[in-house]
Amino acid sequence: DGGITQSPKYLFRKEGQNVTLSCEQNLNHDAMYWYRQDPGQGLRLIYYSQIVNDFQKGDIAEGYSVSREKKESFPLTVTSAQKNPTAFYLCASSMNPTSNNEKLFFGSGTQLSVL
Amino acid sequence: RKEVEQDPGPFNVPEGATVAFNCTYSNSASQSFFWYRQDCRKEPKLLMSVYSSGNEDGRFTAQLNRASQYISLLIRDSKLSDSATYLCVVTLGTGGFKTIFGAGTRLFVKA
């Protein structure tokens, strides 16, 4: 089945620790995205990538890093610089980053909590 | 002012009721409009696109009023399974990174 796979489903971070969230897609989509969702707020864009080996900061990139070495994979690292990391993290992909009617396909999310 | 505003609810309705959600957007250059459904601690899933002419998909009807910068979603004959959060989503231009999400409206349908 084609889709987006995020892992793990739940993740706990200790003080000062970096953690990495995995996102893999087999939809052959060019673009991938990372969003953060907090209670009562809309999804906020952390980073996005429109093509392999290239990525751009979103609205709330501070304290996060990404890589896009393969088309299928777009891992997100939450660094110790992110002081309020507890949130629900969603990875998404879309087929054509130059379209103005772009539908997003989401992974099932990772809930990150601080110990 | 938020770029996409929705009434957070919750809306509590009995089965069989008709319920309407509203959404306003601030950027008049917005190009595409969608409703997504999100269950608790799950990913958002596309419910339907929204067109100026209005569109219907079974019990769901979406309307767009560009002059008023207003989007609506009407659910007829509500089912228990319709209980979820409904996200109003707007794109500002080319590329998925220009997608703006509302905070969502929570719906509870009760037996």
Image (spheres, grey):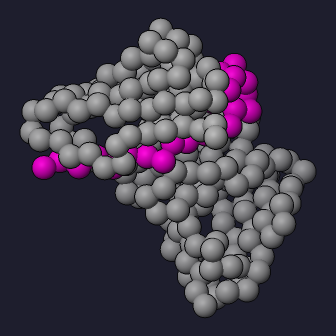
For the record, the magenta segment spans: A94-115
Looking at this view, name the residue that lies furthest to the bottom: B111
In-image side of B53 versus B75 (left or right): right
Q: Is residue B14 above or below residue A53?
A: below
* Left or right of residue B94: residue B101: left
**The magenta stretch spans residue A111:** yes
Q: Quadrant of the N terminus of chain A?
A: top right
Q: Residue at x 54, y 17 (%)?
A: A71
Q: Is residue B23 above or below residue A105?
A: below
Q: Is residue B16 visible?
A: yes
Q: Residue furthest left?
A: A15
- Front residue of A35/A112: it is A112
Q: Residue B86 versus residue B93: which sits nearer the camera?
A: B86
On the image, the x and y values in percent for residue A112 come to: 28, 46
Q: Position of residue B5 (x, y in %)?
A: 56, 53
Residue at position x 66%, y 62% in the image: B22
| Residue B105 x, y percent position in the rendering | 55, 64
A107 shown above or below B80 = above
Give the percent coordinates (x, y) of residue B65: 79, 52
Is B37 within the magenta?
no
Rendered residue at 43%/58% (across/down): B41
In the displayed structure image, the side of residue B60 where residue B2 appears, left or right? left
